[in-house]
Amino acid sequence: METLVPRPAVVFDHVSIAFDEQVVLRDVSFSIPKGSMRILLGASGSGKSVVLKLIMGLLRPDAGAILVEGQRVDHMSERMLLDLRGDIGMLFQESALFDSLTVAENVGYRLNEETDMPADKVRARVAEVLGFIGLGDFIDRMPSELSGGQRRRVAIGRAMASKPHLLLFDDPTTGLDPIISTTVDDEIVKLRDLEHDTSIVVTHQIRDAFYVATHEATRTDGQVRILPSSDERARFMVLRDGGIYFEGSGAELLALQDAYVRKFLNMTLPPW
Ligand SMILES: Nc1ncnc2c1ncn2[C@@H]1O[C@H](COP(=O)(O)OP(=O)(O)O)[C@@H](O)[C@H]1O
Ligand SMILES: [Mg+2]
């Protein structure tokens, strides 16, 4: 009997891309199951942001196929890419809010601009999103009235407002201290465990990578808790020299005796 294997959320099939003479990805293949989380590590310039931009069709590969929800994005028309991006929530690196817009206008931006959702429905969705990230009281504030961590969480709220099924986080905790970073990490954990979204977390903060991989969000009687989980909840991937240098669990990554990984980890491992 044929077994039904669910379609992966993202597939890279022998993908290569170069800029001029510089090869960034060489024959890279991987697949991310629906509802799962992948953590993408790698030194600066190793191609992490390029991977995310390829998924969104903002860049096109020189060779290979890229599938998102079973659809080829590498040959997709701009018109179809716009639809596809409606189902992807992207938190860009250094993701900035629009300073002249309120929190509500920032979170509802895409719903207002890209859909014909009536204003009261947008407001309701924005309130729901802000409730989810615990910033309901800030709905009519300006970004300048928020702390750095709150601004980053509002940017996550903006990415999730249209209920995307795929979330791409590009260095979500860059520039935040470890305590504030944890509040951002918690939102990422909640989106995975409570909304069951597929997510890719690009980071060079090993601490955050292991935090999201080893914590889980639960909701009992409307109360959300983030606790250490008994099992790992993400798979790790390390990019290096145009290829996937490592793919596996966090525990496997920590146990690797490989000189490059040791050096890479030692720069950021505890004490934090
Ligand atoms: N649009 C582009 N044009 C030319 N070079 C690019 C472009 N995007 C990325 N690159 C180069 O590709 C390499 C990988 O970039 P990137 O994915 O941004 O790295 P990171 O892993 O730090 O996110 C870098 O050397 C960068 O300069
Ligand atoms: Mg980057």
Image (cartoon, rainbow, N blue to C red):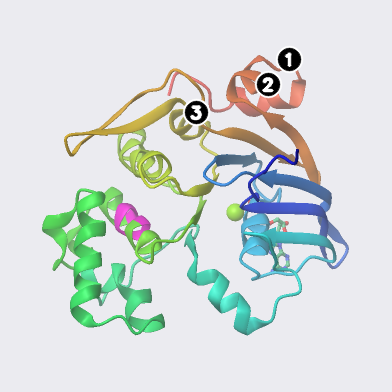
Question: Does residue 46 appear to the left or right of 203 in the view shown?
Answer: right
**Residue shown at the point (71%, 32%) measured from the top left:** 247
> Quick one: SS at disc 1?
loop
Separation of marks 3 and 2 at Cα, in angstroms: 15 Å
Q: CA distance from mark 1 to mark 2?
A: 7 Å
Residue at 54% of width from left, 43% of height from top?
203
Query: What mark, if any, has residue 262 been given in the picture?
Result: 2
Badge 3 density bin: few <14, some 14–19, many ≥20, Cα 10 Å: some
- Which residue matches tag 1? 257
Q: Which residue is mark 3?
A: 210
Residue 153 inside the magenta-drawn segment = yes
Q: Residue at x 35, y 60 (%)?
A: 155
Please name the amino acid that badge 3 sits on: Phe
What's the magenta region? 152-156
Secondary structure predominantly adopted by residues drawn in magenta: helix
Quarter placement of the C terminus: top left
Callout 2 crowding tier (Cα within 10 Å): few <14, some 14–19, many ≥20: some
**Amino acid type at image mark 1:** Gln
Of 199 and 20, nearer the camera is: 199
Q: How far separated are the C-alphas under marks 1 and 3?
A: 18 Å
User: What amino acid type should be assigned to the residue bearing mark 2?
Assistant: Arg
